[in-house]
Image (spheres, rainbow, N blue to C red):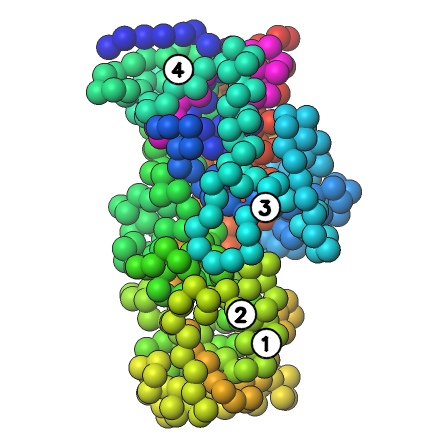
Amino acid sequence: MSSTGPYDIVIVGGGMAGLIAAARATELGLSAAVLEKGEGERYPCNARMSGGVFHIAFNDIKSPPATLRAAIDRATGGSADPGQTQAVADKAGALVDWLGKQGARFIRTKVAWQNYILAPPRPLRAGIDWIGRGPDVLLRQLVANIEKRGGKIHLGTRATSLVMKAGRCTGVTAETSGQSLTISARAVVLADGGFQSNSDMLREHITPAPAKLKQRGGVTGAGDGLRMARDAGAAATALDRFYGHLLCRDAMHSDAVWPYPELDGIATASIVVNTQGARFLDEGRGGVWIANTIAKQADPLCATVIFDSKIWEGPGRSARIPANPCLESAGGTIHRAPTLTALAEKAGVPAAALEAAVAAHNACVHSKTFTASSPARTPEKFTPWAIEAAPFFAIPICAGITYTMGGIRIDGDARVLRDDGSIIGGLYAAGTTTGGLEGGESAAYLGGLTKAGVQGLCAAEHIARTLTS
């Protein structure tokens, strides 16, 4: 086994969190190395394929910290870690300012929470289109900045374990080109993403049928950082939630209809039924929550969204990359029929059950008595629409998983914690390998890029303070 180092900081993972940590560390004069298992300058990662929007719980990232803290508390029902909440709310605005100095360019839309979208933006059409778009450009710019300041990017290098001495992390062991390597460091940052691409971990925590979820990102999150941290004594949060969206079920075999358009806006206005034609979840809790609930079913490919022409022309056009017309132009499956009976035949569900589900839904919409429906529906966040204007529509859907929300427990400075709350010296974590901010019972989504960026900055700045004090 060969060895290298020592570095002031070694970062595991070259996504948004890892590269921001490395760029900030080198800017502060630290020697840094990034270990990335992908190869080539456009190695796959979720951030590279993202929409590039920096926001916090669908609020303008430059809102006052008190406003952002309140938004996080509302979205999570108060379950988010207070230290992480404070850090994200306080540093979010500074993050986009710092990114601008690193070479990031932003555009804005007329929607307040879309005031910081990485440029150039992806086109407003269905399918995969990330090469040369804002996130891809930013990640390559961060790599250039790191290398210009003397930092090292080790591609094709997969971390396998942490080096621990007297309870402190002092480095990483890794594999590269079929050989083992030990890299010594004064501090290590785990930033390799979640475990969304690890079938065994998904089966244990997220779904009984991992193959029936659509991987909606870079398919690189294997949970290595979480495993290594737990082996070193780190605590983990609940691991049972993920961020994702509802997709046309054709996404399981066609790249033309993912990662966009998502069908969340349609589903939250209408009803979602199973193969028996019955509702089985609360559509009013939001698309991310619906995706999580579908993933928990014995057959995650059991769901179909049912709606009408008014919803198709209303919420169907409301998303930034709308299902109407983007899904149809991409060739996605959309069943239309003049009656619910005819629609049921096309969708492959029992007509009587579907007609009963729609009738019960419409009665609740008109009477505004949503607790009487079965299951009860939450009406406050998303307005339910009656389904009564022909033609009627059905789209078979699936749960698209982007990243897992649970992970390593950290404090507001991104330091890794043990179960008793004590700090593991020299060990930090950032981005979607961490937990405690997003997720919870409501499957709350707050903004993955913002979380990654702030935690990457926090880790680098705390390490710099510690090493230079």
Report the mark closest to the observer, 4 or 2.
2
Check disc 3 and report its element: helix, strand or loop: loop
Position above or below: 463 against 213: above
Expressed as whole percent of the image width and height from the top left, the position of residue 181 reads 29, 14
- Judging depth in this view, the residue of 281 and 34 nearest the camera is 34
Expressed as whole percent of the image width and height from the top left, the position of residue 13 reads 43, 28
What type is the residue that disc 2 sits on? Asn
The residue indicated by pointer 3 is: 121
Q: CA distance from mark 1 to mark 4?
A: 56 Å
Q: Which tag, 4 or 2, sits closer to the chain's start?
A: 4
The residue indicated by pointer 2 is: 324
What residue is at 39 percent from the left and 86 percent from the top?
343
What type is the residue that disc 4 sits on? Gly
| Residue at the left extreme of this rendering | 178
For label 3, the crowd category at 10 Å Cα-Cα, with few meaning under 14, some 14 to 19 and many 20 or more, is: many
Circle 2/circle 1 CB separation < 8 Å: yes
Check if residue 365 falls in the magenta segment.
Answer: no
The residue indicated by pointer 4 is: 171
Q: Which tag, 1 or 4, sits closer to the chain's start?
A: 4
Check if residue 33 falls in the magenta segment.
Answer: yes
Residue 313 is marked as 1
Q: Which tag, 1 or 3, sits closer to the chain's start?
A: 3
Position above or below: 319 against 195: below
Position above or below: 116 against 20: below
Q: Which residues are magenta?
A: 22-38
Instruction: Say whether residue 304 is visible.
Output: yes
Position above or below: 217 against 1: below
